[in-house]
Image (cartoon, helix red, strand yellow):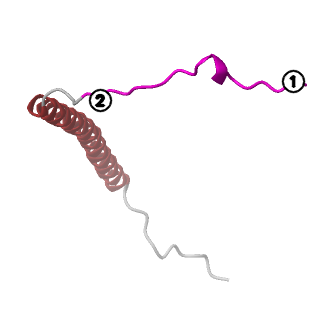
Amino acid sequence: MAPEMNVVDDPPPAADEAQRDLERRALRNVRSLVDNLQNRDRIDGRRSVRLLVVALAVTAVVVGGGYALVRIVSGPPATREITTTLPGPAEGPRVTPR
């Protein structure tokens, strides 16, 4: 039986170390990109919340101003007189004995 031959030669130790160095650098770059994207997402989320708050405040001011303007322009509300007749002594509440 013939001795087994390694068909693929192992790279020399210097090339192996250089490969590891490149891999580490690539991983650091990817991590840096992920951190940057997360920071952008967080900033965009804050910006969206601020925009929503401003939009709601402007809407409240516009609705309140419109209501006040309508109340001022229309003047005081018209009053109506409502007359009621109180029941006389003969027309008291009816109570049925038990």
Point out the tag, 1 or 2, that comes first from the N-terminus: 2
- SS of the residue under disc 2: loop
Crowd band around label 1 with a 10 angstrom C-alpha radius: few (<14), some (14–19), many (20+): few
Residues tagged 1 and 2 counted as in contact (Cβ below 8 A): no
State which mark lies toward you, 1 or 2.
1
- Secondary structure beneath dot 1 equals loop
Across and down, in percent, residue 33 comes to: 26, 47
On-image quarter of the N terminus: bottom right
Residue at mark 1 to residue at mark 2: CA–CA distance:
40 Å
* In the displayed structure image, the side of residue 75 where residue 20 appears, left or right: right
Q: Is residue 11 above or below residue 85?
A: below
Q: Residue extending furthest top?
A: 89
Judging depth in this view, the residue of 9 and 23 nearest the camera is 23
In the rendered structure, which amino acid carries the disc numbered 2? Arg
Which quadrant of the figure contains the C terminus? top right
Q: Among all residues in the image, which is located at the extreme right?
A: 98
Q: Residue 57 at what x, y percent from top left? A: 21, 32
What range is drawn magenta here?
79-98
Residue drawn 48% across the image and 24% down it: 85
Residue 22 is situated, as x and y percent measured from the top left of the image, at: 29, 51
Instruction: State the mark number for residue 97.
Output: 1
Residue that sits furthest to the left in the current view: 73
Front residue of 58 and 8: 58
Residue visible at 33% across and 54% down in the picture: 19
Q: Which residue is mark 2?
A: 80
Residue for point 24% across, 34% down: 53
Identify the amino acid type marked 1: Pro
State the image coordinates of residue 83 (x, y, percent, origin top left): 40, 26
Magenta run includes residue 91: yes
Residue 83 lies within the magenta run: yes
Q: What mark, if any, has residue 9 been given in the picture? A: none
